[in-house]
Image (spheres, rainbow, N blue to C red):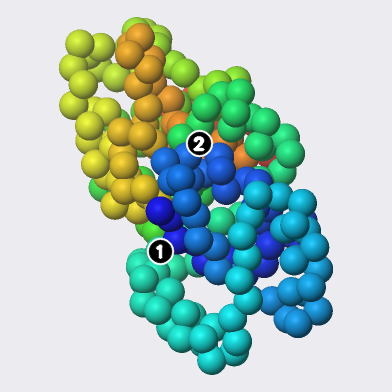
Amino acid sequence: MGLVFILNVGNGKLLKLSTLKYIFKNNSILVVFTPVSSNEAGILKKRLKKTNLVHKTFDTQICRLLGEIISGLLKPDIGMDLVIRELTEKQNKDYKDFEYKCYDKVYIPGTIPMRRSNEIEVNNHKIKLGDSVFKLFLRLALELKKTKEGWVHRHSLGSDSIIADVEKFQIYSNLRTALQGSLLDKDGQKFIENNGSKQYRISLHPDFIAYDKEKLLKHPDNSIKNIAKKLSNK
């Protein structure tokens, strides 16, 4: 059973209940808590009658108690990142078509590295990556942005000098380890996915990866700079 707390339901801004079944695939039962006014409760009741959803309205005192319980369950280092944002219709389709496994947010600020340490943000958490690991991550991000599918064969990574030895896998492990503490699922292998055919990708919708291309183009490592040149200007 899964427990979800959201700020609003089905208003086109945050979340549609139908989206939950794609996010919580392993839960046969989901309990969803959301605050509603008396007027909204009536409207919501009519909507839920058309679906196979059971609803229950609680009074203010019980809602306050539930709020305190749920607030205690939320991990302080993630906070509002646990609030699930509604996917657009196109994003929903992409998640089905490309079978992305994660819903994290990534930002690559392109700040000047200190001692070969590059900063990225995952769900608003700052992470430091060494040049070699950062180069791999940026190359995977480039492929995801270009193709949506995002898969890169490890031999392509070798021929492009992204990795030094295609027969060694430590660099993928290092990248996963660096990221996993800030991931919503805390699962580095799910986020940096391998399909069993010597291909790797970031298992995330490309819309959830942003970067500062202008700053990346000023990176002192030419190989990283060359990857940045191929990024779109969006």
Residue 35 position within the rendered picture, expressed as x and y whole percent measured from the top left: 63, 76
Secondary structure, mark 2, is loop
Mark earlier in primary sequence (2, 1): 1
The tag on residue 163 is none
Residue nearer the viewer, 12 or 204: 12
Residue at 52% in and 44% down: 23
Residue 117 position within the rendered picture, expressed as x and y whole percent measured from the top left: 30, 46
Q: In the picture shown, does residue 95 fall above or below 195? A: below
Secondary structure, mark 1, is loop
Q: Quadrant of residue 229?
A: top right
Going by the numbered disc 1, the residue's amino acid type is: Ile
Residue at 22% in and 35% down: 174
Q: In the picture shown, does residue 18 fall above or below 44? A: above
**Are the residues flagged by discs 2 and 1 in contact, CB closer than 8 Å?**
no
Q: Residues within 10 Å of mark 2 (few under 14, many from 20)?
A: many
Q: Is residue 116 left or right of residue 109?
A: left
Residue nearer the viewer, 19 or 135: 19
Residue beneath disc 1: 78
Going by the numbered disc 2, the residue's amino acid type is: Leu
Q: In the picture shown, does residue 80 fall above or below 38? A: above
Residue beneath disc 2: 204
Q: Quadrant of residue 90?
A: top right
